[in-house]
Image (cartoon, rainbow, N blue to C red):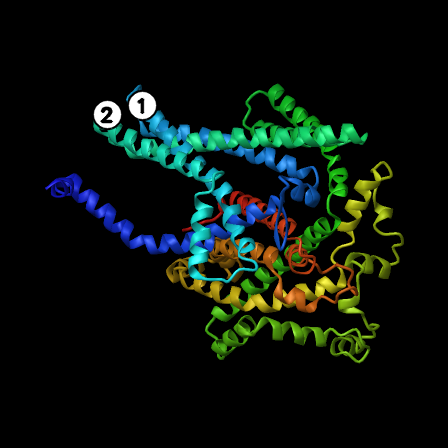
Amino acid sequence: MKNSKLFSGPKGRTRRETLTALAFVSPALILIFTFSLFPVVFALYVSLHKWLIIQGEFRGLRNYVTAIDNFAYLGGFAIGLGLLYLAYLQLKKIKELVEPESKSHYPFLLSGALFGVSALFFLRWFFYQLPEFLDIAKKMRGLERTQDLFTGLLRDAFKAETVYPHWLQFIAVFAAAILVSWVLNRIIKHKDGAQIQIAYSGFWLALISGVGLLGFIYQAVDKVYTESVETGTDPGIWPQLITITTGVLLLVVAWLLWKNSEKQKSNFIFVWRVIASLLLMIAATVLIIEIPTVVAAGDADLWDGLRVTIFFSLGTVPIQLTIALFLSVLLFQKMRGSEVFRIIYFLPYVTPAIATATVFRVIFSDRSSGPMNRVIGLFGIEPQLWLRETTGIFKILSESMGITDYPNSIMPDFFSPELTELLGSYLNGPSQALAVVIMLSIWTFVGYNVVIYLAGLGNISVELIEAAELDGANKWDVFRHITFPLLSPTTYFLSLIAVMGTFKAFNTIWILRLRGASLGTTDTFSVVIFEEFFIKTRYGYASALSFVLFAIILILTVVNNRIQGSKVFYG
């Protein structure tokens, strides 16, 4: 009878529908947790330890400091501030949900706090529980492996003295959160009560996590500072952290002043804003010059891999999108044989990547009898080393034009040695070996981009183009003012996918790279992570590098969304 009352009426129907929906999505949630969320959380856990086959001691941020030096503290500090900003956004969301001058939502602060704290308690239990589960394999060494033995060790790990109390605390707080939430919903009966409680839960979770992370960063910095005092070395953390952060903030303020200066009606205020923004930019540049010192203190392989990845992305994405756009517009015309060319252009994308890379390796052989060297020999060009050439292509071109001592000859003398070395590595450009990798990537993905662009062209209204032609627009005018703007969603999608793909590229690069010959000039970030994990077996450090790469891709995605997303035209 109680169950029938519980599931009767409008609210009962809502409960039935909710339980039914949860039953349907639960398999998907289990799969997502097992194969998506858990590997990421486990990789984060590994990155905080010294990990060589088996778990070592807890290292905190030391793996990240080894990789990017003081940027680890700056990154953690930025994430902490980001969490606090997220808490602020949750408060803004709550303000939008409640009625003006309504105070009935404030009791939901309690239930939201309990839900947020219960989530943190769950993470704490998981953090303590995972080592116990991982020790099961060590405990089974030398024993007969049976199902009963594993089940017993699993039960003992779950009920370990250092773990089980945390589980009970989580259950108690979570049950209290559910009870308080149910009571408040019965008493207040706010129409948006569920959403307000979710927002408050997010607020408390972000607030506590942000404050906790900032506290952890401060403790880590203080520990390093204490060790430096004991050893008599200069940590350099606080000066670099303060100067770089201040420089970035000054750039933001300068940009805001510059952005709003043109809206000012007063000439005095306009001039003041422009001068102030310029002065702030100069000050920020002086402060951020500390960055090369920080970069030099980090892992050289990581920064070299990041530079190679940037070259790879900049050399691949714009060119392949431009070629794909040109070919797609050409193939979209009603020409004889266009269907055949569509298939031909798409074939490289579906060809096995390893086979394609192997063929390119043969074509760009450094032997004088190599296919590509024979082709350029017809034009009187000397044979090239190709995949064995480590010199940057800009440096090669400058030497061919008679420019000596490039790029040092074009840089001011007042630059510091660190800044000169950093800028020089970028001004040299990608190596000739990396240029071959870029050509392979362009050749492979142009066909895929052509197919996507053709789909976008098919969605453009023919009547719109015909109307423009009747008004006297030529082919270029139609493309410039109609076709290209209406293809902006497709271009945005392809550029976003391409940038993320270049930062994660691995298989073809691994085949084309010649170990030792190219001296790491083709080793992208993914290759560096692979070597740290599988060759050097530094699992904790490799996991830290993977999260650094994740942060870079996330930042690039956000920046790309801000820059291109606002310019996308959907018709």
Q: Residues within 10 Å of mark 1 (few under 14, many from 20)?
A: some
Q: Which of marks 2 and 1 precedes in the sequence?
A: 1
Residue 267: image location, x then y, percent? 61, 21
The one of 444 and 74 positioned closer to us in this rendering: 74
Residue 62: image location, x then y, percent? 67, 41
The answer to whether the residues at label 1 and label 2 have Cβ atoms under 8 Å apart is yes
From the viewer's perspective, is 72 left or right of 347?
right
Q: Which mark is residue 188?
A: 2
Q: Which mark is residue 107?
A: 1
Q: Is residue 258 above or below residue 360?
A: above
Q: Residue at x 77, y 27 (%)?
A: 229
Q: Residue at x 65, y 43 (%)?
A: 64
Q: Is residue 509 above or below residue 25?
A: below
From the viewer's perspective, is 313 left or right of 30?
right
Residue at the outermost front position: 143
CA gap between label 1 and label 2 equals: 9 Å
> Which quadrant would the N terminus be assigned to in this image?
top left
Q: Amino acid at mark 1?
A: Pro
Q: Residues within 10 Å of mark 2 (few under 14, many from 20)?
A: few
Residue 464: image location, x then y, percent? 40, 58
Q: Identify the element where label 1 is drawn.
A: loop
Q: Is residue 143 above or below residue 46?
A: below
The one of 225 and 10 positioned closer to us in this rendering: 225
From the viewer's perspective, is 553 left or right of 205?
right
Q: Amino acid at mark 2?
A: Ile
Counting every numbered tag in the picture gives: 2
Instruction: Kindly indicate the quadrant of the structure image that contains residue 400.
Output: bottom right
